[in-house]
Image (cartoon, rainbow, N blue to C red):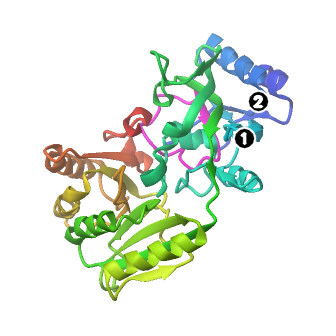
Amino acid sequence: MLRALVDICGPDFARAAGAADAVAGRRATFVAAPATTNTVVDTVGLAAERGLAVVPRGSGSKMDWGKRPLGVDLLLDTGRLDGIWHHDREAATAEIGVGTPIRAVQAALALSGQRLAVDPPSATATLGGMLAWNESGPLRHRFGTPAAQIERISYVTSAGDRAESDGEQGRPGIGEIDGVLLSALVRLEPLPAARRWVTVPVSAAREVPGRVAEIRALDVQPSAIEVDLPTPAGRRPPGILAVLLEGDPADVLQRAKRLATGFGANAAVAPVAPPWWGRYPFARGAVALRVTVPIAELQAAVYALGDATGIPVPIRGSAGRGGAMHAVLPGTLTAQRVEGILDAVRGVLLARDGRCVAIAAPPEISAHIDMAQTRDLF
């Protein structure tokens, strides 16, 4: 098998897997890094012929996310499927290889005064990893999820056939694709000339819906509304609500002033984001939960998490449209304890049009609890 992979990908781009080549604790057998559509087709086709399980890998930032695979025979590294393959500035679209880091995409597009309106919290996220998990950050409030900004996706099926989809007329959406993503035709947005963050302390989750109502009433057209609860131990008040405003410099400053005045004396306006903005409240080794709930029910979600866990649970994320938040549990809990917490929280959220899924956990936990699958995040 290794010799065949070397023949397809080249001698420096196929090898036996090492200790670091694992998915949720399962070590792969081989690693291959094809560089073209044809070599991806050949690599996946070879694996299909031999009945081997293929798992794509970009930067590896989310390799411990989701349901633990039954097997990982071949890690397909997408790092060579990178770059902006075609950029139509007038049409505001670009076709981008899935192995391209989002930061590199944004830097290249900025030269043309454009951007892909996404900001995934994974610092090293590639386009493919972001799309596979529909990973969105604060800009989801205004622009929607990454999947919503895709015109067309190119991929190789698990059988080794090339295919394309726009997610319409019965064709699979990104979350339904069984195979390896190749590239995506994405819609672009103008790069904003100015950005300002308006922040205000919140003493508890119950204050957040009222603050969000104020934002709507003031009609300041936010690009994002985020909340961080709680802030580090010893800080008072224990939470911060932050609002991102973008656009023409004079207009942004006027809207920021109007919002800060509406928030009151404790509000602040800054040209840079709060340190926690666009970052997950969890690190590798913790149990990460994604909570989606109408903002009016945020207090119920926070209370349910704290009550089931017995300790304050950090929660951070969107207080605007989309409502995706993330909470963190200690990675030292037993799998049985985590499952009990999930059951309790889901019971509370079920009647409130909310959901709670575990997206990442240490292998000794993820192997025994109900973990999210990619389709759960679309």
Please tell me in which quadrant of the rendered image residue 154 appears.
top right
177 is within the stretch colored magenta: no
317 lies left or right of 336 = right
Q: Residue 132: x and y, percent?
A: 53, 37
Amino acid bearing label 1: Glu
275 lies left or right of 38 = left
Please say if 291 is above or below 255. Answer: above
Q: Can residue 273 be seen? A: no
User: Residue 299 versus residue 270: which sits nearer the camera?
Assistant: 270
Please say if 32 is above or below 286. Answer: above
Q: Main secondary structure of the magenta part?
A: loop
Q: Residue 272: x and y, percent?
A: 56, 75
61 is within the stretch colored magenta: yes
Numbered circle sitting on residue 34: 2
Helix or strand or loop: what does disc 1 sit on? Answer: loop
Q: Tell which residue pokes out farthest to the right in this image.
A: 11
> Counting residues from the N terminus, which is met first, the one under dot 2 or under dot 1?
2
Q: Residue 364: x and y, percent?
A: 40, 47
Helix or strand or loop: what does disc 2 sit on? Answer: loop
Find the magenta span and give its range. 54-73
